[in-house]
Image (cartoon, grey):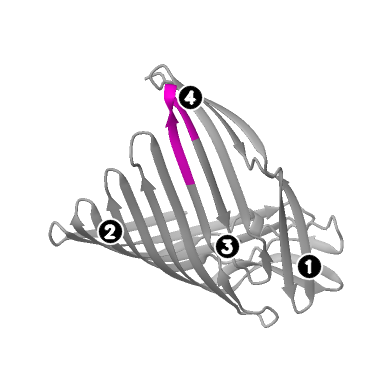
């Protein structure tokens, strides 16, 4: 991959600054599949990636940032590898070496509020993608084929909030949440349009106990991402950890347990197309006990 970058900055006054830039990327991706035909797949990508950012500072602790940029996502080896996994002859998996790079235009407006005891970060965002990569299932010759395709026009609007409050030296609370509405429209006639929310929230409470003991409780709720053909169940997690510092914080020992209430989590995925109806159920052992030791020599 080769990159060529250029960027220009303009400071109009102490409060307002603007950055304008762009980069050009040239990427060559080659996959050599050892088989009878010695198949070689080569893809070449040339992309022009612009960016614009404007920062307005009310004071040292409050500022607004407007940003526009293009995001580039390159398909990984799993998506590109044309090798056919036919361990189940009626349900085969293979990649798509003809996938293109995904280009996403992203506009954000963010606000930062920084105080000694309270920090707040808020961001509004909107993005659009005309060729998003989506898992693609279809029947052919009585075989269920699982692969990937650039066939999704995706729009996403969202709000992110992050707050951190430290009322005193003993207690710290943090909360992070995102609300996102996703709308995907397929370019394929046999896949329906899908829209919905994909929200996430997580939080943490940390408290300092006597004798340099610390206890932390965290948890979260995640809704699955929106896909054209598949939808899944939401995911919950929780964690409790206790740590102890010695030798002027140069030695730290920590013990944590994840999901102390439930030992396993059920994941259910439903795939629906005009000719495919499939329900997958997986169970994951999420209850874990971990210990961690950290040593600092200076």
Circle 1 Cα neighbour tier, 10 Å, few/some/many (<14 / 14–19 / ≥20): few
Residue found at x 60% / y 48%? 237
The answer to whether 150 is drawn above or below residue 266 in the figure is: below
Is residue 224 left or right of 24 when viewed as pictured? right
In the rendered image, residue 79, in percent from the top left (x then y), is placed at 64, 59
If you read the primary sequence from the N terminus, does the residue marked by circle 2 or circle 3 appear first?
2
Specify the principal SS of the magenta part.
strand
Q: Which residues lie in the magenta part?
A: 204-215
Whole-angstrom CA distance, mark 4 to mark 3, is 53 Å
Q: Nearer the viewer, mark 4 or mark 1?
A: 4
If you read the primary sequence from the N terminus, does the residue marked by circle 1 or circle 2 appear first?
2
Residue furthest left in the image: 13
Of residues 119 and 130, the one drawn nearer to the viewer in this rendering: 119
Tag 3 residue: 43
Tag 4 residue: 244
Tag 2 residue: 7
Is residue 229 left or right of 49 when viewed as pictured? right
Tag 1 residue: 278
Q: Secondary structure at mark 2?
A: strand
Whole-angstrom CA distance, mark 4 to mark 2, is 47 Å
Quadrant of res 188: bottom right
Q: Nearer the viewer, mark 1 or mark 2?
A: 1
């Amino acid at each position: 991959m080769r990159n060529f970058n250029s960027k220009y900055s303009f400071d109009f006054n102490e409060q307002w600054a603007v950055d304008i830039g762009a980069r050009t990327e040239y990427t060559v991706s080659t996959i050599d599949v050892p088989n009878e035909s010695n198949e070689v797949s080569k893809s070449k990508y040339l992309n022009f990636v612009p960016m614009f950012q404007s920062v307005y500072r009310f004071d040292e602790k409050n500022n607004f940032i407007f940003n526009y940029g293009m995001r580039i996502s390159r398909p990984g080896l799993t998506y590109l590898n044309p090798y056919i996994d036919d361990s189940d002859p009626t349900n085969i998996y293979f990649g798509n070496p003809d996938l293109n790079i995904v280009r996403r235009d992203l506009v954000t407006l963010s606000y930062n509020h920084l105080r000694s005891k309270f920090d707040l970060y808020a961001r509004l965002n909107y993005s659009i993608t005309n060729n998003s990569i989506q898992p693609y299932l279809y029947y052919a010759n009585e075989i269920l084929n699982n692969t990937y395709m650039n066939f999704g026009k995706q729009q996403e609007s969202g709000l992110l909030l992050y707050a951190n409050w430290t009322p005193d030296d003993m207690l710290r609370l943090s909360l992070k949440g995102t609300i996102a509405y996703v709308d995907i429209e397929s370019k394929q006639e046999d896949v329906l349009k899908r829209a919905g929310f994909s929200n996430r929230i997580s939080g943490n409470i940390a408290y300092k106990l006597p004798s340099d003991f610390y206890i932390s409780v965290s948890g979260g709720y995640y809704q699955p991402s929106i896909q054209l053909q598949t939808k899944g169940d939401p995911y919950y997690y929780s964690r409790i950890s206790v740590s102890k510092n010695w030798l002027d914080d140069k030695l730290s020992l920590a013990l944590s347990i994840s999901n102390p209430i439930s030992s396993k989590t059920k994941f259910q995925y439903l795939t629906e197309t005009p000719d495919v109806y499939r329900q997958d159920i997986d169970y994951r052992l999420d209850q874990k006990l971990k210990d961690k030791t950290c040593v600092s020599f200076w």
